[in-house]
Image: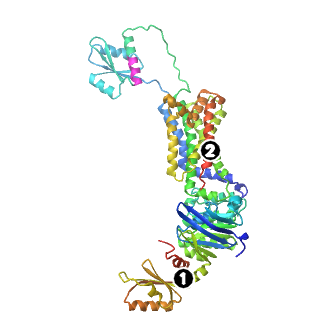
Amino acid sequence: MSEQRGNNPLLQLVLVRFREYLREPEALFWSFGFPILLAIGLGIAFRSKPPDVAHVAVVSGSAKSGPYLEALKRDRGLAVEELPADSARVALRTGRVAVVLTPNADGGVAYEYDDTRPDARTAKLLANDALQRGEGRQDVVGASDRFVREAGSRYIDFVVPGLLGMTIMGGGIWGLGFSIVDQRRKRLLKRLVATPMSRAQYLASYVVSRFVLLTIEAVVLIGASVLLFKIPMRSSWLSIAAIVVISALAFGGLGLLIAARSQTIEGVSGLMNLCMLPMWVLSGVFFSSENFPRAVQPFIKALPLTATNDALRASMLRGVPFAALWPQLGVLALWMIICFGIALKIFRWR
Amino acid sequence: MPSTANLALRVEGLRKHYGDVRAVDGVDIAVPPGECFGLLGPNGAGKTTTIEVCEGLLTPDAGIVELLGLRWDHDEHELRERLGIQLQETQLAEKLTVEETVRLFRSFYAKGRPVDDVIRVVQLDEKRDARVGKLSGGQKQRLALACAIVGDPDLIFLDEPTTGLDPQSRRQLWDLITDFKRLGRTIILTTHYMDEAEILCDRVAIVDHGKVIALGTPLQLIASLGAEHVVKFAVVQGSPTLDEATLGSLDGVRVARAVAGEYELQVGALHQTVPALLAFLASRQLELAQLTTHSATLEDVFVSLTGRQLRDE
């Protein structure tokens, strides 16, 4: 590298960012390996598979036990076994069967199951249905089933945009926070400020390096998801990229604000967890934020990670046009402006 | 003394307080170009605060600071271009190599010295591709010096450049600083090592409790003691305490004082005082536990001014 070419301070600062990053193998794992492993793990756990069979026990010892057993066995959605009364109870308690069916002396049956478990209620309904039909019940209304298992509505489709949002948040907050506070703690920041270095270029080096790394992270994560799980991409790449960029700026601002004053790694770690933990839980990474009470929804919607996740899901899964995402993009832009504004004002350079 | 206009550093009435602590309490310094000027004092004397105000890293509560005829409030950028700074306890990025670090610092300056030259000057040629984290203490300090001189500064500040280093590394750094002096650049350094100040500095300000308590060339300061040698002795434990006045009346003794269980005599000629001292102790039937002599140093000047040792360990 010639003396002239290598002498651009912004270039040198950006190179420092990359060198420090690439020479830290753990950082590489957390930004690339972890999200992919998580997606693969979740993909395996929630993969599309034939519907679960419902386990039912029929208590033995009654004259009706045999015929009822035969009737239930005719339904392919049920796995039926005949057990003595006490073994059947044990099986129910340990969750090996969802329902215990006991023929009564008067010719009726009694079902035992946990009514708070949806799968137990389903098993009871299936078992009862099979039993009644076996005994000759006729349906009043003819019904037929059509099964719809479409990409875009599976759990993995839900979780991948959430993981992407989480990666953007982690990159912005960890990527800036630790590095800046570490330099302040080691008095390297003070040493840099004692040179003619431009402070704007120092901060710009983080912006540039984060964008390059984020581009790679996003491409790897989305690429792996599309290839492995056939995640749908129902919007243009451009609008997804734009959401990623605006989100990255918002979280970069948040990261800078968190790192603006702290002088110890412990201090900044506490602040980071304080900021990120609520968003991991509330912002709909692994489950929908709609599960939280209506009263807190406005607060949840104002969180930057909620905005990112909602925008990414709407764009990737439902093909909502970019312009229609203005509420989410507005939330992100506001976070970006406020965080950068405060951070630059209170930043401790020494 | 040249007129104030072309001083490399002019400090007048400098004060800096932290709450009730007067870290710097009215310091005046004038350093002509080309001089190596030392601030010598114990830890906590206010040396680092003084130098960091001069470096524009701290804002003074009162006083004037002018460097190369420029001031921090108008000419910050030009000053940054023309100063070379080494801070106490800066840890450079451990994952970068020596060459990458120097190149980074070089890139901040509009004009400067070639990276290769600077690495050669600080004798880190063999380590140019080594990570900073793998360097020894002395090598790290030489790298810090390289970062301070890569902008080819007119004025260089070194804050405790050799603290914590082994004797060989200290000597190596002294040689580098001496070489830099020969280029005619002005150097301001702080230290709590009297030998460092004596070897490197043209003039020394002895600082204590935020004030300059003595100023001059090392030779002038030592001469101000009026004694060329120092005799230190201790008597065996349990002996009666000796009177400073009685010791002061021994042949050739200028000043006598008891310091931390030892006695210290500033003397003109050893061959007069030592026999007199031995005869005196024999007459009192006191037994010597130790006896040492040395030529007077800046340390003795500090002890004589403050009654305390320069280094408290």
- Measured as percent of width and height from the top left, residue B1 is found at 70, 76
Left or right: residue A312 compared with residue B256: right
Q: What element does badge 1 sit on?
A: loop
Residue type at mark 1 is Ala
Pointer 2 indicates a residue of which chain? A
* x and y percentages locating residue A307 in the rendered image: 58, 34
Whether residue A256 is visible to the viewer of this picture, yes or no, is yes
Q: Which disc number belongs to residue B296?
A: 1
Picture layout, residue B134 above or below residue A216: below
**Residue A81 image position (x, y, % from top left):** 33, 21
Relative to A103, A77 lies left or right: right
**Relative image position of residue B74 (x, y in whole percent):** 71, 59
Q: Which mark is residue A340?
A: 2
Comparing A177 with A152, the one in front is: A177
Q: Residues within 10 Å of mark 1 (few under 14, many from 20)?
A: many
Quarter of the image that includes the N terminus of chain A: bottom right
In the picture provided, is B259 more to the left or to the right than B75? Answer: left
- Vertical position of residue B154 compared to residue A106: above or below: below
Per the rendered image, the range of residues in magenta is: A117-127
Residue A213 visible somewhere in the drawing: no
The verdict on residue A121 being magenta is yes
